[in-house]
Amino acid sequence: MKVQSYLSFEGRCDEALGFYKKALGAEVIQLMRYADAPPSPPAPPDNADASCGGAAPSPDKVMHAVVRVGETELMASDGRCSGQPKFEGIMLALTAGTDAEAVRWFNALAEGGQVMQPLIPTFFTSSFGMLTDRFGVGWLLVAAHPA
């Protein structure tokens, strides 16, 4: 069994993927836009697509993407295009190999976001910190080696 994270950026997926490329060296390995999908059969009028207010999503929006961050693959899309992504109750944990790497990633992800716990040494590691990035995704960063 494999469990993966699927992030809905509510219309900001392209922007988020570009941000993670710059901040973490992420690599987009799959990207499908709504324009790439085959035409759907017409739905009955009483069964309109509520995901976009009854209208079809914009063809340039991301229907599905897979991005590789280090050894991990995350899936993402524009979701319902509400413009208001909400990532409540979850965080993505990112393990750095060195303190310098933890600092670099932490600072890059914090740009335009909100730091909840600055990077500090703890009893369990030499670098630990938490933040929410500019898209509302929570990140927990830790150095792989103990303090």
Image (cartoon, rainbow, N blue to C red):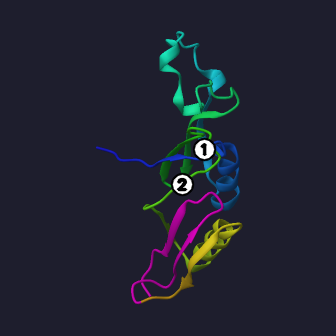
Residue 96 shown left or right of residue 3 in the figure:
right
Q: In which quarter of the image is residue 101?
A: bottom right
Reply above or below: 64 against 109.
above
Whether pointer 2 and pointer 1 mark residues with C-beta atoms closer than 8 Å, the reply is yes
Query: Residue 67: x and y, percent?
Result: 56, 45
The part of the chain drawn in magenta is: 123-147
* Residue that badge 2 annotates: 86
Q: Which x, y percent locates residue 65?
A: 57, 38
- At 51% across and 56% down in the image, what residue appears? 87
Q: Please check the rendered image and state whether residue 136 is part of the magenta-colored stretch, yes or no.
A: yes
Q: Quadrant of the C terminus?
A: bottom left
Judge whether 90 appears above or below 56 on screen.
below
Above or below for 49 versus 96: above
Q: Is residue 142 left or right of 27 when viewed as pictured?
A: left
User: Residue 47, relative to residue 53: is it above or below?
Assistant: above
As for residue 86 lying within the magenta part, the answer is no
Q: Is mark 1 on a helix, strand or loop?
A: loop
